Amino acid sequence: MKTILSKKLPRILKNKKRLEEELKIKITNRGKEVHISGNPEDEYIAEKVIDALNLGFPFITAILIKKEDLIFEIINIKNHTKRHDLKRIRARIIGTKGKTLKTLCNLTRCYFELKDNEVGIIGNPEYIKNAQEAIISLIQGTKQSNIYSRLEKHQPKPIIDLGLKE
């Protein structure tokens, strides 16, 4: 049984039945604590999905972690900069009217969510490394155009499915 401290409990409780069905786990809560019980593999995936919901991802995007074997990563902005004007850094990541984030989503084929001083990324294992490098470069002050050109050059080659995965 795992325990997660949830900041967005109503969002989890609203989708509790769907989460239990999709993830094959049992969810109980006491206050702001969410208890997950099931087999260890399902608990681990459920923990990642609930963390994604807490960060602000919509339910449909968060559940893709289970359905499509996507990876969920969190990058803390403070770990990659010494600057104190974190508002400006968050603004660089979002861009004018969300243009930078939208372009990053298209180039990396990942989903991004920004909350406080954390950036959440959900994506395929092949694409998540490029997405992380792009966000870290933005935090450190690299121009957006340079990041876009590097992402275009370093697109991972598509993996040929040999029919081995179920």
Image: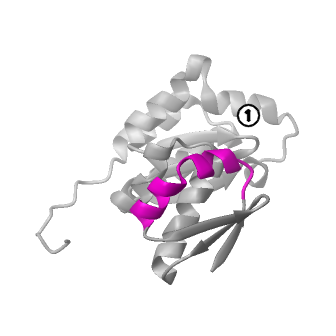
Taking the spot 52% from the left edge, 41% from the top edge, the residue there is 58
Question: Majority secondary structure of the magenta segment?
Answer: helix
Instruction: Give the residue at the far left of this rendering.
Output: 162
Residue 35 image offset from top left, x and y in percent: 66, 70
Instruction: Give the residue at the far right of this rendering.
Output: 84
Is residue 107 in view? yes
Instruction: Give the residue at the far top of this rendering.
Output: 97
Taking the spot 49% from the left edge, 50% from the top edge, the residue there is 62
Is residue 129 in view? no
Question: Which residue, given by chain and number where applicable, does mark 1 sit on?
Answer: 89
Q: How many marks?
A: 1
* Residue bounds of the magenta highlight: 6-23
Asked whether residue 9 is drawn in magenta, I would say: yes
In the picture, the quarter occupied by the N terminus is: bottom right
Closer to us: 16 or 105: 16
160 horizontally vs 74: left or right: left
Q: Amino acid at mark 1?
A: Ile
Closer to us: 74 or 160: 74
Taking the spot 69% from the left edge, 42% from the top edge, the residue there is 140
Residue 73 image offset from top left, x and y in percent: 56, 58
28 horizontally vs 151: left or right: right
Describe the element under mark 1 as helix, strand or loop.
helix
In the picture, the quarter occupied by the C terminus is: bottom left
